[in-house]
Amino acid sequence: MVAGLPKPLKPILQVGIGFLFGGLKMKNITVVMIIAIVMFLVLIIAPKDIEPSSIIYKGIASWYSKDDPGILETTANMEIFDDTQFTCAIWDVPFNTILKVTNLENGKSILVRVNDRGPAKRLGRLIDLTKSAFSTIADLQKGLIEVQVEII
């Protein structure tokens, strides 16, 4: 019948498989058993959770405002740009991702949402924060700060 299984286990698997497949009669029970075993393993072996804060970047943060020359009315994801919101511009992170930005000088941090692309790559900066977000973790007069950015 089914090679390699102990005799007491064979009827249990056959009944279980019959229940799963509505009494489906198959000559090749091995295929059905493989399907049942895979389904069982999928149910009992849960995928490991990825640590949300496992991706960390370090670099320079700047800020931008609607009053800056060249700032568009809309962000890269087509929202109206609002520098009072806690949002940011960063490359290579999907839109609407929440980031924790920590000022490495004073330890203050803030959560921001990605809704724009930038800063200009030629500037060598990691992230642009809105005026409101930046002012929460640093003095606007500083202009540039060293930060750690974690994906939440």
Image (cartoon, helix red, strand yellow):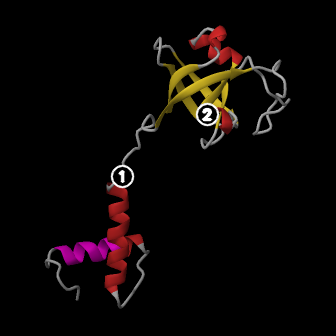
Residue at which label 2 appears: 124
Residue density around tag 2, few if under 14, some if 14–19, many if 20 or more, within 10 Å: few
State the image coordinates of residue 141 (x, y, percent, origin top left).
Answer: 66, 8
Front residue of 24 and 70: 70
Relative to 141, is 6 on the left or the right? Answer: left
Furthest-bottom residue in this view: 27
Residue at 68% of width from left, 15% of height from top?
Answer: 132
Looking at the image, how many numbered discs can be counted on the residues? 2
User: Does 128 sit above or below residue 37?
Assistant: above
Front residue of 29 and 118: 118
Res 111 → quadrant:
top right
Front residue of 9 and 57: 57
Furthest-front residue in this view: 122
Residue density around tag 1, few if under 14, some if 14–19, many if 20 or more, within 10 Å: few
User: Does 135 sit above or below residue 20?
Assistant: above
Label 1 sits on what residue type? Ala
User: Does 63 sit above or below residue 97?
Assistant: above
State the image coordinates of residue 29 (x, y, percent, origin top left).
Answer: 33, 84
Nearer the observer: mark 2 or 1; the answer is 2
Secondary structure at numbered mark 2? loop
**C-alpha distance separating marks 2 and 1:** 41 Å
Res 62 → quadrant:
top right
Front residue of 52 and 144: 144
Secondary structure at numbered mark 1? loop
Span highlighted in magenta in the image? 9-17
Residue at which label 1 appears: 46
- Verify whether residue 125 appears in magenta: no
* Main SS category, magenta section: helix
Q: Which numbered disc flags the more N-terminal residue, 2 or 1?
A: 1
Residue at 47% of width from left, 14% of height from top?
Answer: 105
